[in-house]
Amino acid sequence: MMSTAALRPFLTTTLDSSDISGLGAKYTGKVRDVYTEGDRVILISTDRQSAFDYQWCTIPLKGQVLNQLSNWWFEQVKDVMPTHVVAVPDPNVTVAKRLKMLKVEVVVRAYMTGSTSTSIWVNYEKGVRDFCGNPLPDGIKKNQKLDKTIFTPSTKPETGHDESMSPAQLIALGLTTPEEIGLVKEYAFALFKRGQEVAAKRGLILVDTKYEFGYDSNGVLRVGDEVHTPDSSRYWVAASYAERFAQGKEPESLDKEFFRLWLKEQGFVDDGRPRPAVTDDVRVMLAEKYINLYEKMTGLEFHVPQDPDVIGRIKKNLQVHAA
């Protein structure tokens, strides 16, 4: 794994935005810049770091980690359901099928945890005992394993904030149909099961994850966006989980929950007050966590491209791909 000293030079070469002309209409997501033209999309993973629906900073090499790890996972699940991947011409780039995305975002959960307003733990602590149509008994502790894996869909209204709902509520709003949400749930559980199996072999626990689905031009339902990355999923170290849970300590995590907890330790409250500044030490620490997860999960060494001109490299690799 790269050392802290080796990561520091990359603090000044992070990719905040791509802005490449000639790739099609651009949409800027939380992390990815998405270019659409015809039946294809080009997803460029930047180094932007989001949390609590805010953009905070950039994390060295994060975009490369996310893109490579997501596409490694797409390979692991392509027999479970069709994916959107067409090609990966660059460490930061995925060329994919254009999908008509469902208006439903899916989260699968196996543990009682989380720190955001839509997380199961925050809602449970407030007294919620029916979460997205899943009845929950009293007495569950934070970070405890649930009796069974649950399906907790949500949507993104105009405010930009997720709103957790039961399948019945989503159907009543006309955002999906009983047949569609039933199929989505089946696929989501199958993907999550595969994710848990692969993670367990690497000494990790896949705690929960988000999936996004959409239909291609032929009406085939595919999983898109990203799969089982540290931005869309929560991972804990299996070897220390039981002991830390018994002691009431937070699990060892390899995902961006570390960043959320750090923000709260700095006094962050989403009430309009000035947000805490993210230090370079925190940026490097989060980069280490992303790279560590990539190497633990894939069993591969993380390689850094030698060309510091990330945009130039991306343009060149896309030209080669197009040719």
Image (cartoon, helix red, strand yellow):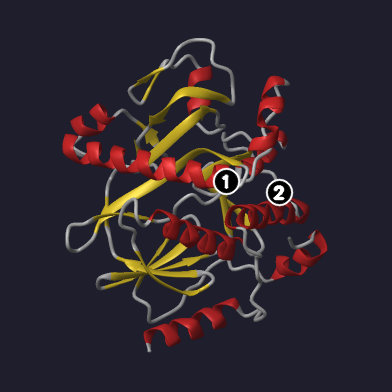
Relative to 114, is 82 on the left or the right?
left
Q: Which residue is mark 1?
A: 201
Residue at the image point whose x is 63% and y is 56% from the top: 57
Residue 282 screen position, x and y as percent: 73, 50
Residue 83 screen position, x and y as percent: 34, 58
Q: Which one is nearer the viewer's eye here, 270 or 42? A: 42
Callout 1: helix, strand or loop?
helix
Distance of label 2 from label 1 (alpha carbons): 38 Å
Label 1 environment density (alpha carbons within 10 Å; few <14, some 14–19, many ≥20): few
Q: Which one is nearer the viewer's eye here, 283 or 191? A: 191
Relative to 158, is 300 on the left or the right?
right
Residue at the image point whose x is 65% and y is 65% from the top: 302
Q: How many marks?
A: 2
As shown in the figure, which amino acid type bears the numbered disc 1? Lys
Q: Which one is nearer the viewer's eye here, 4 or 81? A: 81
Q: Which of marks 1 and 2 precedes in the sequence?
A: 1
Residue at the image point whose x is 55% and y is 32% from the top: 114
Which is in the foreground here, disc 2 or disc 1? 1
Residue at the image point whose x is 62% and y is 80% from the top: 309
* The label number, if any, that marks residue 277 in the structure image: 2
Q: Hey, which quadrant is residue 7 in on the image?
A: bottom right
Residue 199 screen position, x and y as percent: 55, 45
Q: Can residue 156 be seen from the camera position used here?
A: no
As shown in the figure, which amino acid type bears the numbered disc 2? Ala
Label 2 environment density (alpha carbons within 10 Å; few <14, some 14–19, many ≥20): few
Q: Can residue 85 be seen from the camera position used here?
A: yes
Farthest right residue? 5
Q: Is residue 312 above or below residue 17?
A: below
Point out the image quarter for the N terminus. Answer: bottom right
Point out the image quarter for the C terminus. Answer: bottom left
Farthest front residue? 201
Q: Hey, which quadrant is residue 42 in on the image?
A: bottom left
